[in-house]
Amino acid sequence: MVRVLTFLIFAVVLTQSEKVFAQADYKRFFDEDKLPQVRLYYQQGRYNFVMQVCDYALRRGQPSWEWRTLRMKALEKMGSYEEAKDEADAIADAFAKEIGALLEVHGFYQRLGHKDEIEATLSGINEAASAVPKKERDGLDYVYLGKAAHILGADPQVVMEQYFTPAKAEKAKGKNIPPGLVEAHEATAEIALEKSDYKLAADEFRNALKYDPDNPDLRFGLAKAFLPNNRKEGMKHLDQVLDDAEIHLEALLLKAEYAINFEQYNQALAYLNMVRSINPRNPKAHAYLAVIEHLQNNDQQAFDRERSLALKVNETDSDIDYLIGRVLSRNYRFQEGAESQLRALRIDPGNLQAKIQLASDYLRLGDEAKAWPLAKEVGEADTYNVMAYNLEVLEKEIESFATVQSDDFTIRLPKNEADLYGDRALELLTEAKRVLGEKYGLELEERVLVEFFPNQQDFAIRSFGSLGGAGLLGVCFGTVVTMNSPGSLAHGKNNWEATLWHEFCHVVTLTVTKNKMPRWLSEGISVYEEMEYNPTWGQRMTPKYRKMILDDGDLTPISELSQAFYQAKSGQHVMFAYYQSMLVVKFIVENYGIDSLQKILVDLGNGILINDAIARNTTDIGQLEKAFGEHVFKLAENLAPGVDWSRPEPGTVDTKDIVAVAAFSKKNPKNFWGKQQYTRMLLDQKKWPQAISAAESLIKLYPDYVDSDSGYELQARAYRALEQPEKEAAILERLAKKSSEAYSAYSRLMDVNFEKGEWEAVNENANRAMAINPFLKSIHYCQGCAHEALNRPEKAVASFEKSLSLRPGNPSEVRFRLAKLLKEKDVDKSRRYLLDSLADSPRYREAHRLLL
């Protein structure tokens, strides 16, 4: 009813316009005045209405070819492909010299795979393009010519520079937008998107939106430009598209894809049903349905049926298998993803998107011998392909890496880093394979590849094919693990050994399940196994988590737990998702046994859905969620029992006045904030004995609190100020036994114990510190001295050589120590170190005596 009414109003306006401009070129005016609105209706998905208006315009004999192309495209969107084909043929005949019309028809023929018509239209486009006199070209002509040149194989950079840039030269004056200005920005953006140049694409779509802010297609393009590297911003624009155009089919399809990636299969089906209500034959909708059948239902017959339906409109459409494979790979089904890309390339060997995606899949499968040549092929065929270029740069970077290898592992990392911690990484991985392989009954049949990247961008390109991934320390794809090295953004902040153990646990669980496991379970087991191996690793209940559980209602039902990762409100919520996932795993193991967890993984590998696998090996998912919820609430309530976690109301306590804070703390002896604030203020005022006493009271109140402002750290600062190193070391040792990231505590303990000659303690804390920052010079020197004192010459040599690679402040001494250690075993090497020591310090008497 609304559409009919709108149409009648439109018709009345048209009738009035005819009367007013009866003496003018009313047909030209009709086109100029009405086509922009009808284009918008088309962009909004109002295809039936577009058809009605186009039919009306054609009955009037309107001259613009766009009435015919809009009608053709509306028929295509609604799934009337045969009628749309008739319209396309008619347009090609009626407008054989109109390059804009021919471009639209060519696009239609290409989407439907009509090879003869594609060739004929290409010839027509070439002729029409040649016939446009250079002197008569306006901005829109330049855009059409540029699109034609792009279709005919011209270099994209040349196309943008010679055609689209001139079209952008004429600037808008107020509301008067020169013809072709918006289209030139849009065309540039589309080429940039095609080549994975997301920054340029975003800039160009934004420029186009300045002049045409209501255009949902431009907004959709901006969403696509942001999504690979900035999902939050991309989703914001995608949601706005659907706010402005509820049945924008491409936006609905993209929402369905992200819902699949987030394991929200019912939501994905809802989006796809909206698309199919407009066009039941939509090929992409059936492609996504095929993916859902594979991922959610493990139904090969249904997958094949939906894939066949997706190809029914155009059996030569290689993009269908490209889409299926890309989404499968995004869901960690890299083998199936690669197989889909191979199908796409059998249909069209020239599909560069499928080829570069296959290269990426091979990299994640560890088959680099196939990956790099494919990426090179794409780069040579398309010099503007950003992903191909990135992979070419990455290949050269990896070629420069050193390799540390065993029968089970290949570790690649920069040469200087291999010298520092490569041996420790291999040792830890070997231990992880033994412990976790035995536990989960897995004998890995192929060597696991682990790569450490000092540059976060290289890590992102290797892991995701594009920039992004900020905040991630490691990624596991199955038998391939990529890591941000300890020397990258994680420098001195995170325990890389715990991360490496975590990622290798993914290798085990993903292999056992054939990558068929929800994210929450994969992460939960990895965090759980961190803590099983080293109680200071992993996560535990904190005051923040306690508040999120008891006050904020952030506990997620187990059946929806993956969404806690995908739809997290903040970084804190992501970390809480890891923690909750670990708690679920621990709850299952403690209540049903480790064998229940093992059986769940086996069931997942056999294609059983997660809720069914849990029910088969524990209890009904609803009952499990209820029992688990009660368990977690008790855990939160029992965190430091009796502690008052509240903070004073604003204005009730002067937080800068130590007397006021002391009075509050005395009145509220169980208040954590009060004790912590009071201790800090005592330290600030250098009241060391009082600060020691207050810090001890804080520790007793909550002994498991080990953050940087813990009672342990505060008390150690006071002891250090009083020059009481033994007491300082004692309190720091208590902290070190509880935390895997107390870096400053490890470093200080190493120094204190070095002064006292307590070499085992020096070695222990050097190892602790190395798990955070293996680039700290003093670690390797102190550890070398400890090994030397404990008569471990080989380990001492290794430590001192690591120290030398970091250019220590005392190179002569380090070389002298190496010369002494190697004197009996390797005389030539010993003499070399000794001569180098004397070259640095010619008056080094001990070195002279050793040389003599």
Image: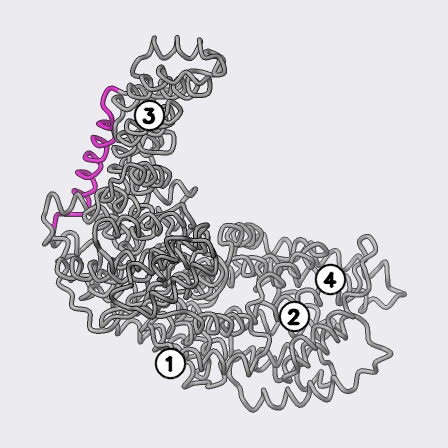
Q: CA distance from mark 2 to mark 1?
A: 57 Å
Which of pointers 3 and 1 lies earlier in the amino acid sequence?
1
Q: Disc 3 to disc 1, how far (Cα)? A: 60 Å
Q: Say which mark, if any, is on residue 55.
A: 2
Mark linked to residue 724: 3
Please state if 691 lies on the left or on the right of 62 as rendered. left
Q: Is residue 336 magenta?
A: no
Q: Which residues are magenta?
A: 618-642
On the image, numbered disc 4 is attached to which residue? 34
Q: Position of residue 780 (x, y in %)?
A: 35, 52
- N-terminal of the pair, mark 2 or mark 4, is 4
User: What's under tag 3, amino acid-wise?
Assistant: Gln
Q: Residue at x 74, y 84 (%)?
A: 129
Secondary structure under the numbered disc 4 in the rendered image: helix
Q: Is residue 746 left or right of residue 377?
A: left
- Which mark identifies residue 369? 1
| C-beta proximity under 8 Å, tags 3 and 2 | no
Residue 678 higher or lower than 458, as above or below: above
Please name the predominant secondary structure of the magenta segment in the image: helix
Front one among 323 and 27: 323
Q: Identify which amino acid the numbered label 1 is placed on.
A: Ala
